[in-house]
Amino acid sequence: MQINREWEYFKFMNTTTIDLREYLTVREAAEKLDISEGWVRDLIKAKVIRATKIGKWRIKPNDFENFIKYRSNITV
């Protein structure tokens, strides 16, 4: 059974494609928030901003929007 699970994971990983152009880099997030790249990395390490390390840290646009939305003092 262990071999089958590993094979299924391998098969999944080889058939999934991710368009990294859709993800924000730390630099892009820092520019949008007008803060330093180091601060963005600290927020990622503290798990305040969700990110995935694919060569370098990448942030899904939806996760970035959620970060901003939940830190707003304006209720909609």
Image (cartoon, helix red, strand yellow):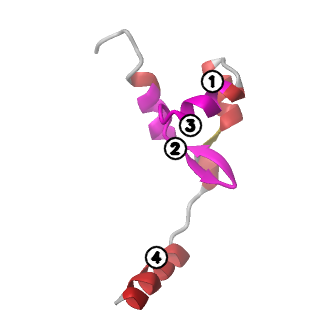
The CA span between labels 2 and 1 is 14 Å
Looking at the rendered image, the disc whose residue lies closer to the viewer, 3 or 2, is 3
CB under 8 Å between callouts 2 and 1? no
Amino acid on which the number 2 mark rests in the picture:
Lys
- In percent of width and height, residue 10 lies at 50, 80
Q: Amino acid at mark 3?
A: Lys
Q: Which SS class for mark 2? A: loop
Tags 3 and 2 touching, CB below 8 Å:
no
Label located before the other in sequence (3 or 2): 3
- Position in image of residue 2 (x %, y %): 39, 86
Indicate the quadrant containing the N terminus: top left, top right, bottom left or bottom right. bottom left
- The answer to the question of whether label 4 and label 1 lie on touching residues, with beta carbons closer than 8 A, is no
Q: Secondary structure at mark 4?
A: helix
Instruction: Please name the residue that numbered disc 2 is placed on.
Output: 60
In depth, the one of 38 and 21 nearer the eye is 38
How much space separates mark 1 and mark 3, taking CA atoms?
19 Å
Residue under label 4, please give it: 12
Residue carrying label 3:
45
Nearer-N-terminus badge (4/3): 4
Q: CA distance from mark 4 to mark 2?
A: 20 Å
Is 17 left, or right, of 35 in this rendering?
left
Q: Which is nearer the N-term, disc 2 or disc 1? A: 1
| Identity, as a three-letter code, of the amino acid under mark 1 | Lys
